Image (spheres, rainbow, N blue to C red):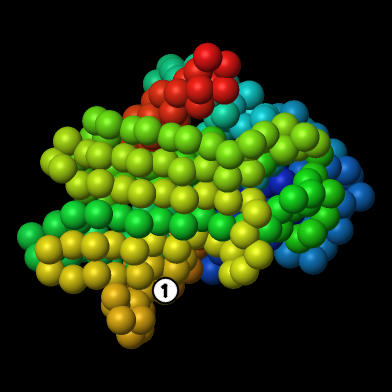
Amino acid sequence: MSHRKTVRVALAGGGAFGAKHAAALRRIDGVEVTAVVSSTLDSARKFAAEHGVGRGVATLDEVLAADDVDAVILATPTPVHAEQTIACLEAGKHVQTEIPLADSLADAEACLAAQQRTGLVAMAGHTRRFNPSHQWIRQRIRAGEYRIQQMDVQTYFLRRTNLNALGQPRSWTDHLLWHHAAHTVDLFAHQTGSPIVQAHAIQGPIHPDLGIAMDMSIQLRTENGAICTLSLSFNNDGPFGTFFRYIGDTGTYLARYDDLFTGKDEPIDVSRVDVSTDGIELQDREFVAAIREGREPNASLAQVLPCYRTLDALEQQLTAATNP
């Protein structure tokens, strides 16, 4: 594809993250968001009108059959990610799938196999790779100025009922391991530049209605000796989100999404790390650039698959502990 050709993108998912992608894509030159599909045709049309998208359509099949769609961004419920990723690739569309790529290792491997068959750009939405805060630290690591000794990570929400980020009822159930832990498991290996060779997990009681653990603790170690402690909860009554403490040989840093602070909570200017300070926009820019340049993107399916292998191993541990 020519570097100058307009990349025509469709959005699948008219919720909170679909809106984030729509806003990000508007800031990227040479990108046209031609269509959006949502839970209903009415909601798709409303989303299109509110976010300047070409049109709202009823189904993903309609998007995949469209001549004016080069690529699809999937911001849909986790249980359909793998099936939809494969469908996009088989329809000849480049695809970016919001995290998690899948909720099983077998499905993640099937997605990678489809990408390898088609040769199209397929990328997972592992946003932490793109947040300026984490990029700033990675630049120091690659320059030989910093070595991670430990990452201490907290992923906290108050989600005792099945609601989404907008406080609306969800048709599916979120998961601490396959969704939220995926961010940290992938980032830890990415930042240390070393594979995870040891992983252990324990979880709290299973919620009687949601059918998932509401609290979880994960420990990781990479081949080069770095360790990570990850605490996750849907029971935390306080600030929500994921907060990373990097403890290294030449400093301690706190990363809160796109923002970065010293270990003493002094802000660090990350405005010159990349062309934007919005991690979602930088993620989408990488997707578009990979399509234009015909190359593998950062957070390609091949690059993130080791994360899903680790998640699978952790799930097997948790299952064995629950059903000895």
Q: Residue 311: horizontal and vertical position, in percent?
A: 44, 31
Say if 191 sits above or below 262 in the image: above
The residue at 73%/64% (across/down) is: 51
Q: What residue would you read off at disc 1?
A: 259
Say if 260 sits above or below 75 in the image: below
Q: Residue 295: horizontal and vertical position, in percent?
A: 33, 39
Between 194 and 57, the residue placed more toward the observer is 194
Q: Quadrant of residue 77?
A: top right
Q: Residue 275: horizontal and vertical position, in percent?
A: 37, 71
Is residue 122 visible to us here?
no
Is residue 134 visible to us here?
yes
The residue at 47%/50% (across/down) is: 231
Q: Which amino acid lies under the numbered mark 1 shown in the image of this protein?
A: Asp
The residue at 59%/69% (across/down) is: 239
Say if 52 sits above or below 195 in the image: below
Q: Quadrant of residue 119?
A: top left
**In the picture provided, is 64 more to the left or to the right than 101?**
right
Q: Residues within 10 Å of mark 1 (few under 14, many from 20)?
A: some
The residue at 36%/49% (across/down) is: 229
As helix, strand or loop, the secondary structure at mark 1 comes to: strand
Image quarter hosting the N terminus: top left
Identity of the residue furthest to the right in this view: 42
Q: Residue 121: horizontal and vertical position, in percent?
A: 44, 36
Identity of the residue furthest to the top in this view: 324
Identity of the residue furthest to the bottom in this view: 266
**In the picture provided, is 260 more to the left or to the right than 179?**
left
